[in-house]
Amino acid sequence: MQLVCAHCFVTNRLPEDKPYTEAKCGKCAKPLYSAQPVELNDVHFHRYIERNDLLIVVDFWASWCGPCQVMAPTFAKVAAQSPGVLFAKVNTEAAQKISAEAGIRSIPTLIMFKAGKEVDRLSGALSEPQLKQWIMQALRK
């Protein structure tokens, strides 16, 4: 299994039988897995999305967006309760290149990635049950 460090963004290869939640990065020695959303930017986005073997949910947001601010605590709470899924955030103001590449037209927009490919997308703020249901549907596919 491959996991990209949430701190230094180096790709780490782990044995399948080793629990990734306890693994440390080979470069920076910090925990590989983060139960909190990872901030991604134009530099780290593709590496994180393409080299992680786990499902990734990315929240595209902006500081001036009211619904984004309302949904942020829910996103963080669901991230903390969802082992086996990685969560990331992209500030569309700071990461304009990635936001344009992803075709972000409204915010918040959530995009789910698996093996570097987009598997689903939703626009608009979600409640905790809605976010959990959306993720569970993707995991069943």
Image (cartoon, rainbow, N blue to C red):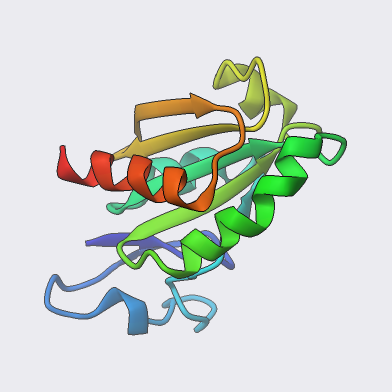
Q: Quadrant of the C terminus?
A: top left
Quick check: 46 left or right of 140?
right
Q: Quadrant of residue 84?
A: bottom left
Name the residue nearer the viewer: 139 or 31.
Answer: 139
Quick check: 91 left or right of 2?
right
Quick check: 25 left or right of 38?
left
Q: Residue at x 67, y 20 (%)?
A: 106
Residue 39, compared with residue 141, is above or below; it is: below
Q: Residue at x 68, y 27 (%)?
A: 107
Q: Quadrant of the N terminus?
A: bottom left
Residue 23, compared with residue 110, is above or below; it is: below
Task: Tell me, yes or no, if residue 138 can be seen here.
Answer: yes
Residue 4 spot, x, y in % from top left: 42, 60
Residue at far right of view? 64
Q: How many marks?
A: 0
Residue 85 spot, x, y in % from top left: 35, 57
Name the residue nearer the viewer: 53 or 82.
Answer: 82
Task: Tell me, yes or no, if residue 94 can be seen here.
Answer: no
Residue 5 spot, x, y in % from top left: 48, 65
Q: Residue at x 73, y 47 (%)?
A: 70
Q: Residue at x 54, y 78 (%)?
A: 28
Name the residue nearer the viewer: 25 or 104.
Answer: 104
Residue 20, compared with residue 115, is above or below; it is: below
